[in-house]
Image (spheres, helix red, strand yellow):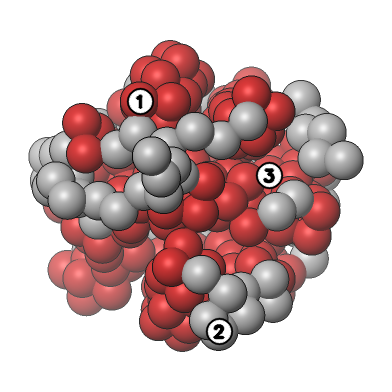
Amino acid sequence: MSNAFRRTGDLKSIGSYPVWLQRVVHETTPHKRRVVDHELFALMRDAKLPLPTLQRFLVGIWPTIEQFPRFMAMNLKKAGYGDGPGVDMARRYLIQNIRVEQKHAEHWATWSSAAGLTLNDLRTGSDIEELEALAHWCWYVCDRADLAVAVAATNYAVEGATGEWSCVVCSQDTYARSLPDDVRVPAMRWLKVHAEYDDTHPWEALDIVATLLGHAPSAREIAHVRQAIRTSYRYMELSLDSAMMASIHGTFDETASNSSTLGFDSLNVA
């Protein structure tokens, strides 16, 4: 019997994927929930996030946003045309979405501008080492790991959790209404796009991982995928915890509503 995987069920149904991958998703979900359910996003949704915290978050996550097309390009180098169904699937996916990620960097810069930050602020942020750790991890895993592991860590884990926390913030219009009319639409574009776009993207990444590794990968391969996903979530959580430290230096009266303030474990892949 062939161990090759070809999805026949619905893209967004976990039951459409190999049993081993279903287990990996189940085992790493608690780590993802700590990201998606983080206090920072609840406060952002309710327009109660202190402005210094929002700014620290925007500056600290910028390296990951700005470099994400590069991470995908690093994975693309591993995908030779005709190397197999999974590789070809990954190749198409990466080529189609690298340009999209560039637009996302522009949207992030626009959102940051509405929070009183310039592009130079984003590029020269200081004291954000813990937030930058996510970008370093993404670079490392895309440079060192095989294609399936790297796609699982970035396009599945990072993009998937990002899409879900964007949905949390957009689940009500409180934060959007806290922004001035003249900047509301462009400032919300990054959040709105990710609340919709990344709903499908991580599932496509999961499909790639399943097709690359098939129904019966080795225990070592499964462990590497699991660890990569879990590590991505842990670095995301670390970034959020670090951003919240800015609250120590501000008060909840100085919120990210802007209307009252601005007027508007490393993976062993050897």
Q: Secondary structure at mark 2?
A: loop
- What mark, if any, has residue 51 been given in the picture? none
Work out which quarter of the rendered image holds the C terminus and state it. Answer: top right
Q: CA distance from mark 3 to mark 2?
A: 30 Å
Check the image and report above or below for 171 versus 117. above
Residue 223, given in percent of the width and then of the height, sits at 64, 25
Residue 252, given in percent of the width and then of the height, sits at 43, 25
Q: Which residue is mark 2?
A: 81
Report the amino acid beneath label 2: Tyr
Residue 165, given in percent of the width and then of the height, sits at 34, 38
Q: How many marks are shown on the rendered structure?
A: 3
Q: Secondary structure at mark 1?
A: helix
Q: Earlier in the sequence, mark 1 or mark 3?
A: 1
Q: Nearest the camera: 185 or 145?
A: 145
Q: Which residue is mark 1?
A: 19
The answer to whether residue 101 is visible is no
Work out which quarter of the rendered image holds the N terminus and state it. Answer: top left
Q: Nearest the camera: 109 or 140?
A: 140
Q: Secondary structure at mark 3?
A: helix
Nearer the camera: disc 1 or disc 3: 1
Residue at x 36%, y 48% (from the top left corner)? 5
Report the amino acid beneath label 1: Val
Q: Residue furthest right?
A: 270
Residue 111 sits in quarter: bottom left
Check the image and report above or below for 169 versus 58. above
Report the amino acid beneath label 3: Leu
Residue at x 35%, y 34% (from the top left corner)? 18
Q: CA distance from mark 1 to mark 3?
A: 29 Å
Q: Which residue is mark 3?
A: 134
Residue 23 sits in quarter: top left
Q: Nearest the camera: 251 or 17?
A: 17
